[in-house]
Image: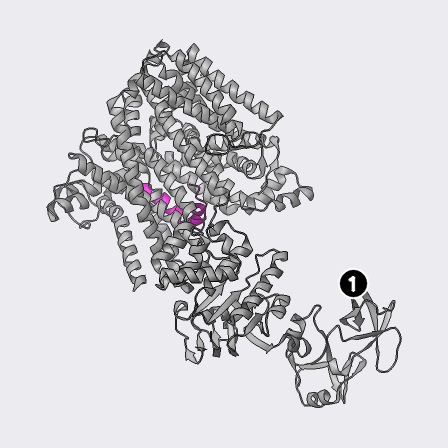
Amino acid sequence: MEKWPNNRAWLLVLPVFVIVAFSAIIPLMTVINYSVQDIFGPNQAIFVGFEWFREMLADKRLHDALWRQFLFSGLVLVIEMPLGILIALAMPKKGWGVSLCLVTIALPLLIPWNTIGTIWIIFTRPDIGLFGAGMNSLLGIPFDHTARPLDAWITVMLMEVWHWTPLVALLAYAGLRAIPEAYYQAARIDGASAWSTFLYIQLPKMRGVLTIAFLLRFMDSFLIYAEPFVLTGGGPGNSTTFLSLYLVKIALLQFDLGPGGAFSLIYFVIVLLFSFIFYQALERIGKGDKV
Amino acid sequence: MARIELNEVAHSYLPKPVKDSDYALKRIHNVWEDGAACALLGPSGCGKTTLLNIVSGLLIPSKGRVLYDGKEVTALPPEKRNIAQVFQFPVLYDTMSVYNNLAFPLRNRGIHEKAVRERVLEIADILDLTDFLKKRAAGLAADAKQKISLGRGLVRSDVAAILFDEPLTVIDPQLKWHLRRKLKEIHEKLKLTFIYVTHDQVEALTFADQVAVMFEGEIVQIGSPQELFENPEHRFVGYFIGSPGMNFLECTLEGNRAHVNGTEILLDETTAEKSRNKKGNLALGIRPMYLGVHPNPGGDRVKADIRMVEDQGNYRIVTLKLGKHTLKASLSEERPIPEKEAWLSFPTEWTRLFADGWLIK
Amino acid sequence: MKFTLAWMEWTVPTAIFCSTIIAIVIAMTIWQTVSPSLERRGFLPIPTTPGDRLFIGILTSVYIFFAWIGLTQFSPWILLGIVVCWVLVVMIWG
Amino acid sequence: MKGRKKFVGLAIYFILLLVPIYWMLNMSLRSNADILASFALYPKDITLMNYMNIFTDSSWYMGYVNSMIYVALNTAISLFVALPAAYAFSRYQFVGDKQLFFWLLTNRMAPAAVFALPFFQLYSTVGLLDTHIAVALAHCLFNVPLAVWILEGFMSGIPREIDETAFIDGYSFPRFFITIFIPLIRAGVGVTAFFCFMFSWVELLLARTLTVTEAKPISAIMTRTISATGLDYGLLAAAGILTIVPGAMVIWFVRNHMAKGFALGRV
């Protein structure tokens, strides 16, 4: 759709600009200021140049957190994307089941993130949790997410998959529903198997929504904070300390404003790069690859 | 190639149809001969697509049987029926090349790759698609896409019939004509049974040897374009075919004269004879091109007021008022048209009578 | 209750940095209002407008900055020169 | 046969989806002593004591009230500013439109942790710390861009001829926007409100950082209970169940439009 060129449209955007600028630009400038100073207290600061950047860029714990973060986001995508598509394929297309399925599936998405953590604490505790106790006593597999890093990872992954696969499933479902019936009819007439129908019709037609699902899941898992904070607090050791958890530890708990500022900027720029890729991908979808 | 027979077919989308109006298709009993080019013509919502889906096997009818060459196929799924279908908008496998699109139905049937290649090249040649074979199907123009959809049906050597569901809807007007001619040419070359669904009478009448007109879930008439034009068996056919449609005048009968609010119109002796013992509402019908318009009275002419004259190029359409009825007449451009009033003549050989909507014959 | 900027802990270098960025953005806006530019293809893999190129230039500069600080001990002033050149390259040929 | 396999798979998934929630419900209906003493698949002596505790202790139930207040405030602010902006993005071309849209999007993607500290400083300087409006404004950081994004999708689906006709008919922009345009995208406004509600409701970090006592949200009160010694699982579970209820209710109301919001892929 051709848009009307009109610079006065800025007036309509102005309130949004002001409110987001207030919440984004001022804090960002503050973080820039922090990142070049050693701050002892209000108005007591020494200019240190790029020292904090040098320190944070060489910080082994930050590297570990970053790789952990990439591993986590990668695993999230590898598990959630196929699973979400499978669920979407299995969901009914019409009838009373649709509403029921949609509401049930969307339920985890509306639970506050810390409640998600709480649910999974209660569910996986080795003494009182159905999952933890079940693993330990029924299957005889020792399981304790508070003591063993692998168990903690399994728990965080389970929680994440439980929490966010519905988003992928709902997006994929919406994409599937948008495919005109004629495509399925043509496939039947051409004698296509269920697998070829999926491969040559459903998957290509879902490409748009799946791109969005992929990017959203990547971004959101990259920013994950509340759930592992509640569930494991980043432990045991630092085994589930993701970037946000580490940043909060430095900036809010230790109140190291300088390194925290430098860290924030590094984190932000990484996210900015992915956002840019995200945006470009969306633009492409908008330009003619629509379902 | 096959002869397609529909035996007392009816279909309802409701699980338990009771009333007549629950049925999307009321009663279809019809045969399409092998190698025929047939059209199904009717307004939107008359059940054309439902009927087509029953023929292709995408729908199983609530009642009745479908036979291909005398063999019952009613419950067979589309992939077992050897038919092909071209949909309203092009249905393609966008990620594949044109070649792979055309090869897809053959590969699914486990045909040897060498045979696939031969056949695809042959069909691509017929459809003028050879130059595009390596291109991605998604990037082509609508008419090329529609040709690919058709090609996916043609590649199968065993295909019994090809069904078209308003295939020209998304094609630009100037290409429509071209594609329609291509279809006709392919039909002549391959002698396949073509069933062509449309709501456009021009498309139906130019494409098909035999046109079935559908109305509210029923086939009201099957015939050649000429038959449909000259002897519409139902008021709907008369009204739907021809531009403008047939004129209808509610009338009563007295001897061999029809009374239309006060004026008398002379009828053919045999028609009047048959009509005399018919019950129900009678109506007189005449095609605009047969309605005589004269500047002066005489014979059995009837006086009417002229309301409007539209110039359509080599003919003109005159809108007339006869009592409370509005009539249209089409006149060739040389014929003079009187100013305000005209005297109409109803040639008996072209004047038809309808009882409760159906032609009296 | 008075709104002050003291808590933001401004320093001269950061003030210069932020005002430079803001000035560039404002200048770009004015330039594009007066004579809007069309999208075009340069050496970057996507078609871009000058605004896009500015953003890409600055974003990649930040990564160059990280690499410089993290991997080398050279003076940041050399870096500044490199970055300015890089942004200009992206703006002109990108 | 195939349909059956699908159904079984889906049923298994739904069971796995609901079991953790069921387990929390189970815990919330038992006393803490009972929970620690024995392992049971269902509550044998159902007690509503945990819920009673929450409803009688103001430090608990005020948490819900606080959450509700800032969520409502945030949803209202987000919609109010996002509606005209989304209209501008969907209908007009202006200098920097794409860049601005992208910048908004980056804020949807920005890690809350980056902004937590400066927010704390900013709001304490302007004296808004520990107020509902502070949390509501902070959540605008990601909800306003989100609202613009979703609404823009819905508005682009409305043909522009409608606007043109209205302007030719002599409608002023505000009158057209309020009396004609907004009613047309009712469903979109509903979906947007739903997502704003959702993201403000589930967020923890900023809400916790910006509040001390007065406006402390339920999520922060719950995390406090976790870190306290002698964890009361029953109470925690009951509080958790109560945080699910509003979301579940909202889902039920928008269930028919929800898929549309997801279909636009703008979450």
Image x and y of residue B36, in percent: 54, 74
Q: Tell me the residue at 66%/76% (across/down).
A: B226
Q: Nearer the viewer, residue B256 or A179?
A: A179
- From the viewer's perspective, is residue C20 above or below residue B312? above
Residue C25 at least partly seen: yes
Q: Is residue D14 magenta?
A: no
Q: Main secondary structure of the magenta part?
A: helix
- Which residue is the site of mark 1? B310
Report the magenta residues as a range. Answer: D243-267
Image x and y of residue A34, in percent: 37, 16
Residue D239 at least partly seen: no
Q: Nearer the viewer, residue C81 or B293?
A: C81
Q: In which quarter of the image is residue B207?
A: bottom right
- From the viewer's perspective, is residue A41 above or below residue A105? above
Q: In which quarter of the image is the N terminus of chain D?
A: bottom left
Q: Quadrant of residue B107?
A: bottom left
Mark 1: few/some/many CA within 10 Å (<14, 14-19, 20+): few
Image x and y of residue D161, in percent: 63, 46
Residue type, mark 1 in image? Glu
- From the viewer's perspective, is residue C77 above or below residue D179? above
Q: Tell me the residue at 24%/41% (across/down).
A: A120
